[in-house]
Image (cartoon, helix red, strand yellow):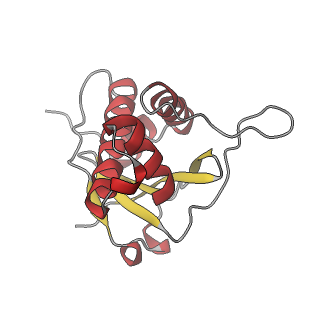
């Protein structure tokens, strides 16, 4: 079987515009959460998640992974819409499960579109410790996409996969 080089893998899977489209569709269609708009009616696409956020990583069978950092308040709203649980009933386990499910849904939808030939596989998402995300692990073609709703942020970035 022919294996693609690292650079070819990145070009195939590092598609910022496609992942923006997937995020918008998933957040609005599945979670019923709509993006904030600026004064000109354009979607707000920059923002920093709060310190009260959950980190999740999901990787493909390549040398990079997608890092999700999602405000816990946004996850609570997503869980309420998706699982039908009121925000007062949510536990840390619910929040972390929602973060992993979000990464799985977005990652899976993205992979189907970015790799229609099904060359790559998707891992099971895992909760990451905030201090395990290092600046030095950013890939050369690094970017961050933020989905902002009600001032709450979900940021997604590619990072080098650790051994």
Which of the 4 image quarters holds residue 96? bottom left
Q: Quadrant of the C terminus?
A: bottom left
Question: Which residue lies most toward the left here?
Answer: 1
Q: From where the camera sits, is residue 108 visible?
A: yes
Q: Which residue is at 36% across, 43% downward?
A: 102
Q: Position of residue 153 (x, y in %)?
A: 57, 53
13 vs 144: above or below: above
Q: Which residue is at 33% across, 48% downward?
A: 98
Q: Position of residue 114 (x, y in %)?
A: 39, 29
Q: From where the camera sits, is residue 63 visible?
A: no
Question: Which residue lies most toward the bottom here?
Answer: 131
Q: Quadrant of the N terminus?
A: top left
In the picture, measured across the screen, residue 154 lies left or right of residue 80, that is right
Q: Which residue is at 65% across, 52% downward?
A: 151
Q: Which residue is at 41% across, 35% downward?
A: 12
Viewer-closest of 52 and 127? 52
Q: Position of residue 73 (x, y in %)?
A: 50, 56
Viewer-closest of 44 and 92? 92
42 vs 92: above or below: above
Question: Which residue lies most toward the top here?
Answer: 116
């Amino acid at each position: 079987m022919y294996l693609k080089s690292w650079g070819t893998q990145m070009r195939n899977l590092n598609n910022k515009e496609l992942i923006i489209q997937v995020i918008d569709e998933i957040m609005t269609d599945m979670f019923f959460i709509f993006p904030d708009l600026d004064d000109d009616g354009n979607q707000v696409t920059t923002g920093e998640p709060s310190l009260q956020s959950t980190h999740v990583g999901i990787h493909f069978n390549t040398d990079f992974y997608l890092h999700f950092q999602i405000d816990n308040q946004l996850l609570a709203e997503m869980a309420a819409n998706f699982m039908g649980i009121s925000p007062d009933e949510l536990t840390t386990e619910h929040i972390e499960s929602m973060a992993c499910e979000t990464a799985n849904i977005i990652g899976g939808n993205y992979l189907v579109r970015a790799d229609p030939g099904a060359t790559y596989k998707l891992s099971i998402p895992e909760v990451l410790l905030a201090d395990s995300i290092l600046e030095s692990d950013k890939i050369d073609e690094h970017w961050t996409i933020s989905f902002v709703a009600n001032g709450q942020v979900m940021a997604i970035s590619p990072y080098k996969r650790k051994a």
